[in-house]
Image (cartoon, rainbow, N blue to C red):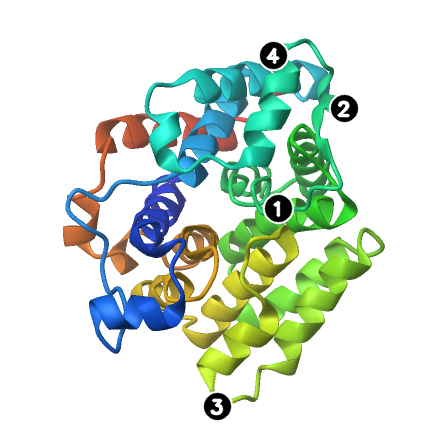
Amino acid sequence: MSFLPVLYGLALGDALGRPVEFMTLDSIRARYGPRGIAEPPDPALFTDDTQMTLALAQALVCVENDDTDQLMEAVVAQFIAWAHHPDTPGRSPGATCLRAVAALERGVHWRESGVKGSKGCGSAMRVAPIGYLYQHSPERLRAVAQATGRATHAHPAADAACIAAAYLVKLALDGAHPKQFSRGVLEFCDGLSDEFDAAILRLNHTLGWADTDAALRHIGEGWVGEEAVALAIYCCLKHPDDYVAAVRLGANITGDSDSVASIAGGIMGARLGRAAIPADWIVRLERRAELETLAERLTYAQTHPPL
């Protein structure tokens, strides 16, 4: 499968959530009606979530071996370029990522640059390319996700969320049903973070609840990594065969709407493919030619691994 449906899926989820990221659910419904925001604007502009995903994908396709240090050199270069891109200030970049990248630019090693104690979702929101590229190499997926995450976020819960977000893309590509997601990430991230485990358990508590709004509130707001991943899983569970419904649910929350919708969108793009994503959404997505070219390169890298 091409990486393009994953990339379209996450970028459009991001664009859908962007206008409402800092609004409460009540405010979203007051502005957009009882269903909340239903489709991305035209043009569909994404945030730092997709920007950093593209930066990470660019790094992955630049390195033709499995040397983590060499890969991280490319990641650092791409993250610094992202921080200096003229569009970045207007894309709501996360303070943790900006602070960590500034440290990288000063020469701090990536193993030490992550902001101590930060477990924001900035490391989890960008790792779909890792889940795609290393679909068939789960231990490599774990190692690369953790390394790229620690460059900006130095907290065990961020470690677990970052690894889990990448692993969820792998599970979706494998054909796993969303009912298997919670158990899968708990097993794959076992022992990394009690806080991450607790967020997934909160998600599991809500599975029989009829009140979706109450379930979302119980899981969290998504500003921290473990909550963003748990909320994204919930969206996939509620709408396992409907990309649009899943990302709409992720965007219409009190919390980090663009990140939750983006993570869920990448997973659902991996699960359902391009046909599940509305064509009229795709045509309004910004920088499509760039996204398509990068997706082709990552698809080639995944299908032609290093010898």
Q: Is residue 148 left or right of residue 251?
A: right
| Above/below status of 75 relative to 40 | above
Q: How far apart in space, not on screen, are marks 1 and 4 (Cα)? A: 21 Å
Residue wearing tag 1: 120
Location of the N terminus (image quadrant): top left
Foreground disc of the pair 4, 3: 4
Residue ranking furthest to the top: 107
Does residue 229 show up?
A: yes
Of callouts 2 and 1, the N-terminal one: 2
Instruction: Indicate which disc residue 105 carries.
Output: 4
Residue 269 spot, x, y in % from top left: 39, 53
Q: Residues within 10 Å of mark 3 (few under 14, many from 20)?
A: few
Q: Residues within 10 Å of mark 4 (few under 14, many from 20)?
A: some
Location of the C terminus (image quadrant): top right
Residue 215 spot, x, y in % from top left: 53, 79
Q: How far apart in space, not on screen, are marks 2 and 3 (Cα)? A: 44 Å
Kind of residue sitting beneath label 1: Gly
Instruction: Indicate which disc residue 210 carries.
Output: 3
